Image: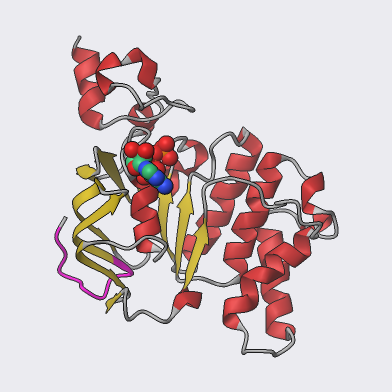
Amino acid sequence: MTTSDPSAPVVLDQVSVPIGGRPVLRDVDLTVRSGEVVTLLGPNGSGKSTLVRAVTGLLPHTRGTVRLFGTPIEQFRDWPRLGFVPQRSSAAGGVPATVREVVASGRVGRRRLLRPSGAADRVAVESALEVVGLVDRASYGVSQLSGGQQQRVLIARALAGEPDLLVLDEPTAGVDLPNQQALADALGRLKARGATILLVAHEIGPMMPLIDRSVVMRDGRVAYDGPPLTQEVASHTHHAHDHPADGPGSHDHVPHVASPLDFERRNRS
Ligand SMILES: Nc1ncnc2c1ncn2[C@@H]1O[C@H](COP(=O)(O)OP(=O)(O)OP(=O)(O)O)[C@@H](O)[C@H]1O
């Protein structure tokens, strides 16, 4: 989608990203406007994580331009405005940190160099813990928590930085329904504060009412960019192994949404 707002939180214009010499993102146009919640959908390997890694500056692009809040990413310095929740690995990571410590680490970008944390930092950390419903677990070691709760710790860490743009890569993968609901509530509050959210999601679930737009990736390109997919389409999942045409190497680890075109095609047959 082209944009009339070059100062939008995210603007990708004809962006290509190769990995290991292979084109993984190809000529991608994408705009996420201020205050929007946009979901990135698409089969495994279609380039969703690559796209968010290009947006968060973790992966360089070779063609096109990536702009954050109107500034080309190469010149962008206002990183505290951006929060990123990476694809789930583990918030514990073998480090014996408490929940509060991990969440407080999200304030680092907001603090002046070598200054101890102040009242504003403490308020932001407590508020983030409250939003994700982990106040009563704040002094627990992160490794004592369930996977879904650890995911909420990562989200609280991003929220503690009070980002204007929050990018989340599959925050609900493998997360049970109560945790998905807690996440949806947290994102709803962030949205109410005016934040912009770009979300890679296989499982939309309780987040559906928050979504303003859906973008479906396929083979490194944008295959659909438009109104949010309905709950019916979004919940119409399949596994890649049902579709041999997807070819080798596209093994799926979770049910996923393909493009709306697939949905219609399957309904016709
Ligand atoms: N570090 C890497 N080295 C080599 N190839 C990679 C690397 N990262 C991604 N790829 C390839 O790039 C393509 C896009 O991957 P990407 O992770 O962006 O897809 P995705 O849509 O996020 O998939 P998933 O839903 O499984 O997370 C895939 O073919 C993947 O194998």
x and y, in percent, of residue 261 in the image: 20, 28
Q: Residue furthest top?
A: 269
| Highlighted magenta segment, given as a residue range | 2-10
Residue at position x 63%, y 75% from top? 107
The location of residue 221, given as percent across then percent down, is 21, 44
**Residue 220, position as x, y percentages in the image:** 25, 43
Residue 13, compared with residue 93, is above or below; it is: below
> As displayed, is residue 105 above or below residue 41?
below
For image coordinates 54% across by 48% down, the residue present is: 184
Looking at the image, which residue sits at the far front?
A: 21
Q: Position of residue 141 (x, y in %)?
A: 83, 54
Relative to 64, 250 lies left or right: right
> For residue 232, which quarter of the picture?
top left
Residue 187 sits inside the magenta stretch: no
Which quadrant does ligand 1 occupy? Answer: top left
**For this view, does 46 lie left or right of residue 160?**
left
Instruction: Name the residue located 60 percent from the left edge and 56 percent from the top edge.
Output: 155
Applied colour scheme: secondary structure
Image quarter in which the C terminus is found: top left
Q: Main secondary structure of the magenta part?
A: loop
